[in-house]
Image (cartoon, rainbow, N blue to C red):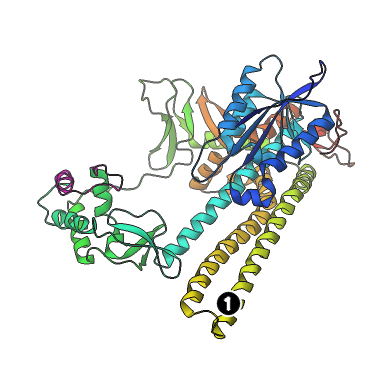
Amino acid sequence: MVRRSSGSVRSPIARQAVLYARVSSTEQEREGFSIPAQLRLLHEYAREQGFVITEEFIDIETAKQSGRSGFNQLVRCLRRSKTSQPGILVEKTDRLYRNLKDWVTLDDLDPEIHFVKEGTVLSADSRSADKFMHGIRVLMAKNYIDNLSEEVRKGMAEKAAQGIWPTKTPLGYVNSTAADGRKVIVVDPGFAPLVCQVFEWYATGRHSLSAVTRMSRDAGLRHKTGTPVPKATIHRILTNPLYTGDVVWDGHRFPGRHEAIISRELFERVQNVLHGKPGKHRQSKRDFAFAGLLICGHCGCSLTGELKKQRYIYYHCTGYRGKCGEPYVREEVLEEQFANLLGYLTIEPAVLDWLVDALQTSDAEASRIHQGAIDRLQVEYDKLQRRVDAMYVDKLDGRIDRATFDRLSAEWHAEQEKLRQSIDTHRSSGEVYFVEGAKLLELASRSQELFAKQPAEEKRKLLAFLLSNCTWSHGELTPTFRQPFDLLVNMRKSAGKSDKVIAANGTRGAGFENWYPQRDSNPRSPP
């Protein structure tokens, strides 16, 4: 949504800016993230700082409507304004970026961004330390989103452990609501017999998968949307233990509460037909430390590892695009160069302590918001509990019947469960927000030490987390560090790796003065 601001007279010397506000759900709106609240804050900041607002970009995301039209229009506005790019006013980091791609998109345009609640301004002239801290905040915002997703997955895993299928039902079942208010699955009387017939056809061993697919279509088996089922869907049906009454989730198998469509004996016969042809045993490939991490600088193909004389590991270009002149390289040579590169991420103790302190200060606002949300949710939870208690007394006194009590108590307990999960999410997010940021800094600082001690698989995971698009050419490794680690590397390279942050007498090292807080050259009033 875009709003054109009106009613104000533009001054020739006034700075221009655009506003961006976002709310992702009605729950967030109840917790203080409403669009009007954000706009009031941003307009007040604009008046104090002398900005003229030219446009307002708003995104209201719901479960039924995805996408960010307001953000996309904001990007187009910035791209149009090549000569005099307006500043961006936004409440805080996680209101502007929904993912790392959004961050990269705006970072390429290099606008001046005012994060009003956080009291920071990011621009092309910002110090490397400010950009690095901003990168940390973006990663923490992403971690918050990932944590919410993790909580959803945990809830689904818990449902599976209780024997309840936690997601959309496959053909043969439909979603329903049990007497206790829980979402369950029940047999679909229309498609369940056809699904059972599919198993019986294939169990005979006389029909191929393609033949069974054609037979099922002729019998009327369709997706719930009415489209014919493809062969891939038939294969998923034949390999899904859900039809035997079990729930398989995340590699674990649990007895389900739903009714089985086929017997376990029929399911096993189908699996025997599917896997009946014996195949040669394939030995697992050796776990090379740098497999999948290196690109040939000559031709752009991948570098692959190879064991020679059962002792030495060499890497060479796959030559997928033709013969390549890049010679073989020993794994020890690559390991040494990777270790040297990780040395640029080392943060001296004094700087690390200062960064953690700054991170903790920025975390105070997030903790306050989480605690406020917990308090409001707890009030709602307690209100529902008082209703249940009062209704129980009414049932004992005969003022309401048992059926009404059971129905209402089930509804209120279900609401309480949702509130409890939201409270747990806010508690865990509040705890993780600062802890994860500090762990990220510690990981970067200790990456060289950890790299030297880890086995091949863990070395590869560590490098994949820190690096991307590494090329090897003429015996030299050229890496691209992921954000925000690239900012730290650039700082170290410009200062010189041998510089000391704190000299023996306690004074600052010349190469790292930008890491320490200084007087802002562009003072501004607090929001």
Comparing 318 with 275, the one in front is: 275
What type is the residue that disc 1 sits on?
Met
Question: Which region of the structure is painted magenta?
Answer: 210-230
x and y percentages locating residue 58 in the rendered image:
63, 34
Quarter of image, res 172 = bottom left
Tell me, yes or no, if residue 438 can be seen here: yes
Q: Is residue 335 left or right of residue 280?
A: right
Comparing 332 with 378, the one in front is: 378
x and y percentages locating residue 436 in the rendered image:
65, 50
- Residue at image x 88%, y 33%? 519
**SS under mark 1:** helix
- Residue at image x 72%, y 56%? 372
- Residue at image x 78%, y 24%? 8
User: Furthest residue to the bottom?
Assistant: 397
Q: Is residue 200 left or right of residue 49?
A: left
- Give yes or no for residue 65 being in the magenta stretch: no
Q: Badge 1 is on which residue?
A: 391
Graded by Cα atoms within 10 Å as few (under 14), some (14 to 19) or many (20 or more), the crowding at tag 1 reads some
Comparing 33 with 287, the one in front is: 33
Image position of 459 with respect to 493: above or below: below
Q: Is residue 97 left or right of residue 525?
A: left
